[in-house]
């Protein structure tokens, strides 16, 4: 009797996949939080920040705003600058403590302050202290260290919308009360929006109108340089077809968004690895766009406020119903009012509706142009240039519900 044939054990699929070769040599360089040694096309803004915060090296507080659309480098510029000024101060025998607060995650005064205090004491209790008591603890921490504090409030508009200007005012006045101890607090506010217009008069008086860093969307050639840099940093040599860099720059130039371009590159690398090939080619980029576009759209939608979503929903519904390329602002506003009723919301004024349109246009979802010949009056025409109206309507509806 013959024995049973020996069974060759199957290779572990997970181990086989995880240990397979990759076109990527350093995945960290494709992370949104990665800070390269050089920031292409942002030297001018870094130099401006250095000029603004130069007095901080002499213990004089400064308050600056960085403003710009999604993907223009606001956060990475702030992080690179703050880490640099901390090191420069240390070389001069001075201490500048730097804390970065995401105000979308910490949207109240207490939560933002807790994030600051956790920098000094990770065990600081998350409840039981009033804002005023927490400010006093912060004062003692700085005095004990003989340190200045540089606080970055990222997406500061989220904090201002929920809690107002009180914390920002308190922090900007910190140096007044601590002038004898020379432990001032400086602020760097980051936002897509005009946060100065959201400050009350007392807090606004501590900011100079000239202390604003304006970031424009990246041009196609600037995105090319950014992608080229990340290819060199993240990928093995000769594993990315040069046409891929061109194609990614072309795709992302529509939004001027460096984050989108880096994510396209990352997804294209993953697509190549899934096929177990040693070269990223344009077809991988096209596959990455198909996957990433949906993710980017949802991410940007989540940044819109409720009435901005209602406005976008109304536009998409109207375009879908009419089957046209454009809807005029009058019809869009009527549909917006009806949409508000459907969601038990009170329609806002005409001026607010127009502001919503401009905000949505700034986020890249719609285009607005003059009506031109053949239309009565000076109405504007709204279009959805990139995303099918049905898809926009469905995604917005999910968020509204």
Image (cartoon, rainbow, N blue to C red):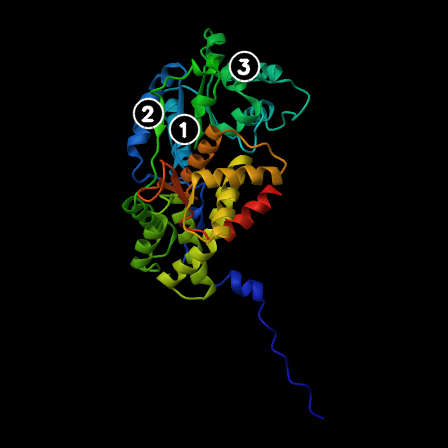
The dot on residue 54 is none
Residue at the extreme top = 180
Element class at badge 3: helix
Q: Position of residue 92 (x, y in %)?
A: 36, 20
- Separation (CA) of disc 2 from disc 1: 10 Å
**Disc 2 to disc 3, C-alpha distance:** 26 Å
Residue annotated with mark 1: 82
Q: CA distance from mark 1 to mark 3?
A: 21 Å
Residue bearing the label numbered 2 = 50
Considering only vertical position in the picture, is 288 above or below 346? below
Which mark is first along the chain, 1 or 2?
A: 2
Residue 30 seen from this side: yes
Marked residue nearer the N-terminal end (1 or 3): 1
Residue at 57% x, 40% y is 339
* Image-based side of 232 in relation to 131, left or right: left
| Residue 55 sits above or below residue 194 on the image | above
Position of 107 compared to 61: left or right? right
Residue 314 rendering spot, x and y as whole percentages: 52, 43
Q: Nearer the viewer, residue 248 or 307?
A: 307
Residue 56, quarter of the rendered image: top left
What residue is pinned by disc 3?
Answer: 139
Residue situated furthest right in the rendering: 1
């Amino acid at each position: 009797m013959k024995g049973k044939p020996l069974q060759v054990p199957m290779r572990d699929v997970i181990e086989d996949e995880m240990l397979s070769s990759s076109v990527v040599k350093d995945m960290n360089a494709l992370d949104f939080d990665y800070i390269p040694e050089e920031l292409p096309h942002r030297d001018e803004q870094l130099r401006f920040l250095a000029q603004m915060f130069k007095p901080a090296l002499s213990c004089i507080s400064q308050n600056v705003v960085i403003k710009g659309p999604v993907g223009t480098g606001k956060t990475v510029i702030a992080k690179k600058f703050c880490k640099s000024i901390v090191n420069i101060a240390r070389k001069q025998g001075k201490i500048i403590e730097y804390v970065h607060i995401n105000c979308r995650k910490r949207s109240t005064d207490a939560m933002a302050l807790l994030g600051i205090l956790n920098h000094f004491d990770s065990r600081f209790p998350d409840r039981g202290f009033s804002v005023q008591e927490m400010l006093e603890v912060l004062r003692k921490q700085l005095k004990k260290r003989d340190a200045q504090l540089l606080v970055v409030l990222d997406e500061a508009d989220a904090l201002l919308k929920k809690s107002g200007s009180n914390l920002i005012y308190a922090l900007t006045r910190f140096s007044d009360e601590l002038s004898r101890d020379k432990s001032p607090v400086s602020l760097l506010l980051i936002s897509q929006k005009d946060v100065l217009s959201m400050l009350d008069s007392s807090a606004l008086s501590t900011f100079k109108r000239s202390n604003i860093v304006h970031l424009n969307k990246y041009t196609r050639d600037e995105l090319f340089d950014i992608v080229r840099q990340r290819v060199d940093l993240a990928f093995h040599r000769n594993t990315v077809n040069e046409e891929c860099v061109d194609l990614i720059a072309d795709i992302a130039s529509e939004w001027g968004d460096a984050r989108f371009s880096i994510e396209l590159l990352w997804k294209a690398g993953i697509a190549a690895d899934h096929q177990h090939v040693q070269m990223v080619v344009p077809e991988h980029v096209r596959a990455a766009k198909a996957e990433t576009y949906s993710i980017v759209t949802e991410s940007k939608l989540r940044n819109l406020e409720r009435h901005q979503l209602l406005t976008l929903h109304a536009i998409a519904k109207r375009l879908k119903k009419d089957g046209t390329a454009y809807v005029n602002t009058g019809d869009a506003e009527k549909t917006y009012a009806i949409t508000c009723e459907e969601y038990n919301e009170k329609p806002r004024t005409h001026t607010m509706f127009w502001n919503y349109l401009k905000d949505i246009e700034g986020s890249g979802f719609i285009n607005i142009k003059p009506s031109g010949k053949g239309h009565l009056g000076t109405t504007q025409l709204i279009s959805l240039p990139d995303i099918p109206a049905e898809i926009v309507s469905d995604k917005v509806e999910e968020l509204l519900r």
